[in-house]
Image: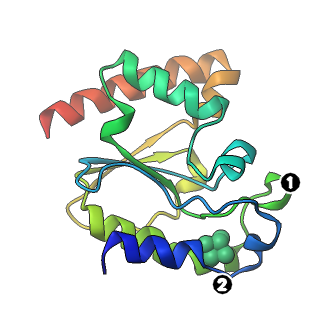
Amino acid sequence: MAMEELNMQIYGCKKCRLWKDAKHVVPGEGPLNAKVMFVGQNPGADEDESGRPFVGRAGKYLTKTLAEFGIKREDIYITNIVKHISPKNRAPYPDELASCLPYVTAQIKFIQPKIIVLLGASAKETPRVDGIEYIQVIHPSAAMRFTQMRLKFRVQIAELAKRIQQN
Ligand code: SF4
């Protein structure tokens, strides 16, 4: 299946209840030959408004921090395990996760990244594929708020930059 076809499926998806209260679905974006894929939990209000992933305050902070360590946002594919916002930003329910997971699985198969970066523990359900290195980092929204987490986040992104150079 081509990525365009997959995106069309996501744009028309009503497999779980989350589409009903959302303004836009957020499939993900980035180059289809990206070496690195970032995966978060699900879109927030700014992402729901724009239909683009990680464009709110946390997304801007992430983009800025990546740039400080020489990682260009435009070189990475970035998405979420669940493609619609949840009411009141609650965590997605297990049945919603189960309905949406085939999309991120298909995106991983299509892009075949060398590294997948899991943004926050909430992305832990991201499917594991042999041959791909998985790196867990603190969610940028937590890194923005707490000094200790920010310092750790920066160390994690510095390590990530090294791993990218080695690949
Ligand atoms: S959250 Fe995923 S499974 Fe649920 S309606 Fe949206 S795209 Fe479909």
Q: Residue placed farthest to the left in the image?
A: 166
Image: 145 above or below 49: above
- Quadrant in which the N terminus is drawn: bottom left
- Left or right, 127 with respect to 91, comes to left
Between 163 and 80, the one lying in front of the other is 80
Depth check: give the residue in front, 101 or 85: 85
Position in image of residue 51 (x %, y %): 61, 53
What residue sits 28% from the left and 28% below the top?
Answer: 161
Residue 165, horizontal then vertical, whole percent: 17, 31
Q: Is mark 1 within 8 Å of ligand 1?
A: no
Q: Where residue 131 appears, x then y in whole percent?
A: 20, 61
Q: Position of residue 98 (x, y in %)?
A: 59, 79
Q: Classify mark 1: residues with Cα within 10 Å, few (<14), some (14-19) or many (20+).
A: few
Mark 2: few/some/many CA within 10 Å (<14, 14-19, 20+): few
At horizontal 57% and vertical 34% (from top left) the residue drawn is: 59
Is disc 2 in contact with disc 1, using a CB cutoff of under 8 Å? no
Whether the residue under disc 2 has CB within 8 Å of ligand 1: yes
Give the amino acid type for the residue marked by disc 1 in the picture: Lys
* Outermost residue to the right: 88
Label drawn at residue 88? 1
Indicate which quadrant contains ligand 1: bottom right
Residue denoted by label 2:
15
What's the distance in space between the residues labelled 2 and 1, CA to CA? 20 Å
The amino acid type, in three-letter code, at marker 2 is: Lys
**Callout 1: SS:** helix
Residue that lies at the very extreme toward the bottom in this rendered image: 15
Q: Residue at x 30, y 21 (%)?
A: 70
Q: Is residue 143 left or right of residue 126?
A: right
Helix, strand or loop at mark 2: loop
Residue at 60% in and 80% down? 99
